[in-house]
Amino acid sequence: MKNIAKFAFVGMLIALATTAANADVRVTANIATSTTWTAGNVYNLVGQIYVLPGATLTIEAGTLVQSVVADQGSLAVCRGAKIYVNGTKAAPVIMTSKLDTLTAWHEGCNEWGNLTIMGKGLISASHYGGLPVGSNTKTPTGLNEKAMEGLTAGTGYSIMYGGNDDNDDSGSIHYLSLRYGGKVLGLANELNGLSLGGIGRETDIDHVEIINNVDDGIEIWGGTVNLKYFSIWNIGDDSLDIDEGWRGKAQFGLIVQGYSTNASQGSGVGDNCIEMDGAEDSDAQPVTTGVIYNCTVIGQPFDGDHATAWRDNARVQLRNSIFMDMGERLVQLDNTDGDGGSAYGYNGTLSWAATWTTPYTATSTVNAGTWTAGAFNDPAMLYKAQTSGTLCEISDCVFYNNLYASAYTEADARGVRAAANNNVTATVSPIQGLTRAATVTRGGKQMQQVTNINPCPANDALTSVNTAPVDGFFAPVKFRGAFSATNNWLAGWTAVDAYGMTVTTMNAADPVATLTMTASTSFPTVAGVVYTVESSTDMKNWSPIGTVIGDGSTMSVTDLKNYESAKFYRAIRQ
């Protein structure tokens, strides 16, 4: 029997191979008109390059973008501009240092800049570094904006982010590898691997890798952008850092803590795996309120910092994930925010303990304002990511080899390992393989770099109790961690694969595809396997439109509402 779903599936496979470079192109001027960078060239960034408002930068699959320390090359997309990174599994877009051989890992970072994108989503930034920020308020007026850290203001472009459009579209990123980058300009003024300021939920980001960055791997300030399939290795500060009222979703993330260079912790040696800051100041709105599913988080067992650090009233749900080999605590409360407030419980906001027992539906009245900014006439309009549970939550996860004396002290105080949360403290590894190098000293810390990994789940991670909701973004898979038992999605496009640091026999699944051009077609499924259905008008930029759970039969998918003869569809096995 055939099952019918709500969306059409029309598939076509594209094999795109990276071609030999035709020319070295020096990029020395800002991009003021829509431009395409092609795979036949190598683009060398000289200085900070801005994509200016109204312009679009499109980067073809297989394109190499690079720079050297002396050129100080970096790429920033201004608020009102767009970027389309059209990499594929077979031909990713690579942004890296000229010192990168593309075939072997080397110790290093800070060898070029980064990719920064600035958008129009709501942010909370009334204070920064203890000082007020311009005319910004603690209420969500939609007028708050802030200068992006790591960038320098100049004539003809803006480095501001923030606004009143949580549905802002800054473009899309697919299959992008960012290597050996970052820059430390001063205290709290750095270039992360990927910096996202005020990015809206209409911006699509999936299959992104950051390896060997001097500062954070990915940092998100405010907005509602969602992430899917992200790999963050050997970061010099926090691997994933969220701040200033981020209210998005993330799924399928790998974090491998390590070092990128012999420098202090936070400037070359890994700090926190996930750092969550809520708002600046702590009683401002919107406050970080997000949900993260299916991450595999691997720390440094001797001198790594915390798995999760919580500040400034951040509210985040972490579910169906793996936390292993942590050097310090699973949950760290940093209840001094450094910007003049007192973090959780400040000025009538919820206490730290209360956020772990208060339902997600609760919205604060502190600095709520009149809620008249644009369409946000109800606080629930700002906080859409969480749909169940409590404001802060760690559930349905596996904890393994976290041996620090107080590794679970704060987590246990919050009830994380209570039976109702379905977490497992494992005695056997939840992944299929992990190899570390001999211990070395970097930045005064004892580090054991991961040299090879098979990240697919084992033992307690093979099956989760619950799944992510079916909401058009999440894939409702029933395993813990970022990978299924047979699908290593690192294969084919990451530096980790190119450097021989991951098992490639479990290749990431290719799209299930047919060549039909009708509004209804069929494809075979495997029982219990989730397929994400995506659509495209050019077979380069793909957007998820829903999921199908296989039952072992041939399933038909039909789109009677949104089908277009010029639109292509594909199904990706998760």
Image (cartoon, rainbow, N blue to C red):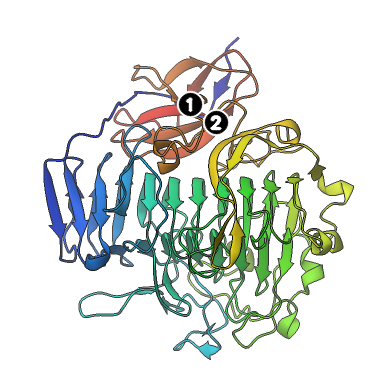
Amino acid type of the residue that numbered disc 2 sits on in the rendered structure: Gln
Q: From the top left corner, tell me how far across and down residue 447 is, in percent.
A: 59, 56
Q: Quadrant of the C terminus?
A: top right
Q: Is residue 459 left or right of residue 58?
A: right
Q: Secondary structure at mark 1?
A: loop
Return the mark for residue 574. Answer: 2
Q: Is residue 78 left or right of residue 425?
A: left
| Residue plotted at (19% across, 48% down) | 42
| Residue plotted at (40% across, 42% down) | 495
| Residue plotted at (62% across, 51% down) | 292
For the residues bearing labels 2 and 1, Cβ distance under 8 angstroms: yes
| Residue plotted at (20% across, 34% down) | 19
Q: From the top left corner, tell me how far across and down residue 272 is, in percent.
A: 61, 63
Q: How far is mark 2 from mark 1, CA to CA?
A: 7 Å
Crowdedness near tag 2: few (<14), some (14–19) or many (≥20) residues, C-alpha within 10 Å = many
Residue denoted by label 1: 509
Q: From the top left corner, tell me how far across and down residue 494 is, in percent.
A: 41, 40
Above or below, 5 against 275 in this view is above
Residue 313 visible in rendering: yes
Residue 362 visible in rendering: no
Pick the front one: 69 or 73: 69
Task: State which quadrant residue 337 falls in.
Answer: bottom right
Crowdedness near tag 1: few (<14), some (14–19) or many (≥20) residues, C-alpha within 10 Å = some
